[in-house]
Image (tube, coloured by chain):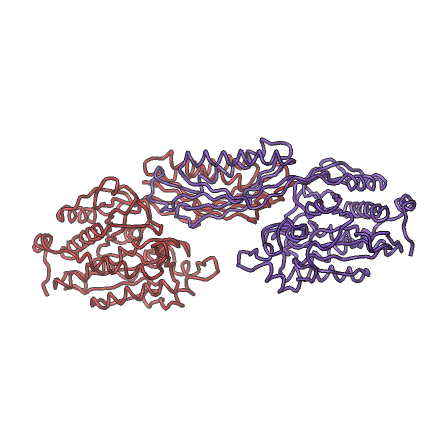
Chain colours: A purple, B red
Amino acid sequence: MTTATAQDISTLRTSLRVNGERLWASLMELAQIGATPKGGVCRLTLTDLDKQGRDLVIGWAKEAGMTVVIDKIGNGFMRRAGRNNALPPIMTGSHIDTQPTGGKFDGNYGVLAGIEVVRTLNDHGIETEAPIEVAFWTNEEGSRFVPVMMGSGVFAKAFTLEHAYAAKDTEGKTVQGELARIGYIGPQEPGDHPIGAYFETHIEQGPVLEDNDVTIGVVQGVLGIRWFDCTVTGMEAHAGPTPMALRKDALQVATHLMQEVVANALRHKPHGRGTVGMVQVHPNSRNVIPGRVKFSMDLRNSTDALVDQMVTEVKAYADKLSRETGLSIHIEQVSSYNAIAFHDNCKDAVARAAKALGYSNMPVVSGAGHDAVYMAKLAPSGMIFIPCKDGISHNEIEDAKPEHITAGCNVLLHAMLERAVVV
Amino acid sequence: MTTATAQDISTLRTSLRVNGERLWASLMELAQIGATPKGGVCRLTLTDLDKQGRDLVIGWAKEAGMTVVIDKIGNGFMRRAGRNNALPPIMTGSHIDTQPTGGKFDGNYGVLAGIEVVRTLNDHGIETEAPIEVAFWTNEEGSRFVPVMMGSGVFAKAFTLEHAYAAKDTEGKTVQGELARIGYIGPQEPGDHPIGAYFETHIEQGPVLEDNDVTIGVVQGVLGIRWFDCTVTGMEAHAGPTPMALRKDALQVATHLMQEVVANALRHKPHGRGTVGMVQVHPNSRNVIPGRVKFSMDLRNSTDALVDQMVTEVKAYADKLSRETGLSIHIEQVSSYNAIAFHDNCKDAVARAAKALGYSNMPVVSGAGHDAVYMAKLAPSGMIFIPCKDGISHNEIEDAKPEHITAGCNVLLHAMLERAVVV
């Protein structure tokens, strides 16, 4: 086995490439687990399907000679030894859980790109100085259990293991119970695991790269995110005999605040985002005026100051609306993720790799949270984006081109190799 | 037993009164079945609780010497024989199913007022010329199974028994299956049952009587109703990375149409009503832009011409909204109930009884559909309203005063007696 050294890097850049077809085949095989009729994937975290996905990926890691450690929140660390195993590993990873109507690439690409990096190093008999690790993080999506990015969040001590364990899905099942049920409570304390540097490869989930016809996005940072639950309380009453003037229609009041969430984001261009994704009407009967409406608000922007300004404005609007209508409006923060800037060394490693490999590239910002956000608190971190079709993800028609999948993985390989050699 | 004759009517008006305390006690006892912590009732049609309610009411009827017939859609007819049983019965009735968060009086009052009329006639040994019948109609509320007013609708041949049987709740259970399960598929063909005249006593479910401090509403007719399901189809996508300008947010477009439903009703005073009571967002995840929103629209007015005008305007608004946003909007009619005017003879009988008994009274319009709407197609029909607290019904805090409950039942007694003697 060859041990790569700093002076080998330029030689390797000329010659070493991942096996794109093998990576694509693995992506398609994993996508069979929870495949939907429309071509997407529904593999919610900690379900039987999630267990099948985890088992498949771990099987591949073991075939590639990696050792596997699971921690108490179910994060998996698949390790390829280096020459100096006292060094902290150069890590990549992402998640394999999906949205209820998710696609084949979100998260899954980041994990399988890591496996492909290892397979490629094996193919060429290349030994790195530092060990290489590929992580899959539990419950990144947050659609079954809140908070999102749960596994990486516990790992980074953003919240406690106990807090995560107690989270319940809509049926009242807990994270702890479901983790135990699928056999993924491991022995390691979350976070008890040094990291030398962290890279995450991901589809962009937005349209910027596609619009610019660029292959590689060198991710500069991640938008700050604030999540709220908003409850408007009126008075339910019979839809027929209650004159319009005497109504306290919670839904009508809610629609104005829902519109402000979007209007506010439009006032905060270019990076402002405002979304109402979830709505619950009570009692939800067609001839009863809604007495209570609960809905989610998702606000994002490129700096914490900007997103906080959006929050202030939306809350002021809600106060005014409440005064004008006499209906109570309660806004509760569910989660908050600060805007983050990735580490210069990692951004540079990604940009250098893309340039050396001849891929068009540009700096971009991530609109979505990723596990890399938490890793950035622990170690120098960076992300690599590739285009996805029409900028669409969290959707069954999410799609990416094989050549972009391959390109992103080649950039990952060379960025990791640079870090794993020049530690 | 005394047989009442036309010439006895004025004497009876002076002396004969129902037992208000007994009626109140029966209402409170029935309200225990499905009682909610907030003082309301949740007794959805064709549930175990509905069966318990039906059994209790039938038990009371039998104690009062009545015979009971159930038809194939589960409607119950509790009969007190007259002197001439070849005459079609003078009927009263309503329903005992409730909304998910319903009150103690809606429907239940109309059925138990009928039982109290019979108990009162028994107490005083009064025989009528025509038989008296008290009906309870299956699934008036429509909150578990559509269409509403199902039992009276099948009885009046507004739709077929097979259509009603096939209706499914959100769990996929059918009306036929649930009726059989609770043992309420009777032998009689629905509608195979002549009616001499029909009266229905009901809380107003609106604020007009209370505002006017009037005890008895002489109901002139019922607002025309049109029900629609509206579906807005956009494109679901990730809430973070999808720039505002590229979104096809189905919920945002839907909120504008939801507002138009209310604004339209406000433009059609005094009887126009517009309500969005039910909303379903897909996929309903907080970080996914909604790809599809389905919601109900309920439009009402005092004449069919007015309500049709409202429908035309709302559809035109939806077309314009669809053109402007590029999102598809599909509007499908679910149910339609024509505005109806009650029979002069019945309205006069109610007004005469209220006047003779010394109760303040005024003509009112019903904003809600009632089983009496279908009965009006088959026989001279009328309704008696009493005030309810704050005009609120379809709510757990629905309330009515015992003296109004008694007054409405006294008016029912004398209106029925007039018709049952002077047949």
Q: In the figure, residue B328 lies in which quadrant?
A: top right
Look at the image and tell me in which quarter the N terminus of chain B lies.
bottom left
**Residue at image location 38% in from the left, 67% down from the top:** B182
Q: In this image, B61 relative to B152: left or right?
A: left
From the viewer's side, name the closer residue of A362 and A83: A83
Q: Where is residue A249 in the image (x, y as percent from the top left)?
A: 41, 42
Q: In this image, A416 relative to B409: left or right?
A: right
Q: Does residue A118 sit above or below B234 in this rendering?
A: below
Q: Where is residue A226 in the image (x, y as percent from the top left)?
A: 59, 41
Q: Where is residue B233 in the image (x, y as percent from the top left)?
A: 55, 44
Q: In the figure, residue B213 lies in which quadrant?
A: top left
Residue A38 seen in render: yes
The number of discs equals: 0
Q: Does residue B246 sit above or below A406 in this rendering?
A: above
Q: In this image, A346 relative to A146: left or right?
A: right
Q: In the figure, residue B72 lies in which quadrant?
A: bottom left
Q: Where is residue A127 in the image (x, y as percent from the top left)?
A: 88, 54
Residue B423 seen in render: no
Look at the image and tell me in which quarter the C terminus of chain B lies.
bottom left
From the viewer's side, name the closer residue of B84 and B270: B270
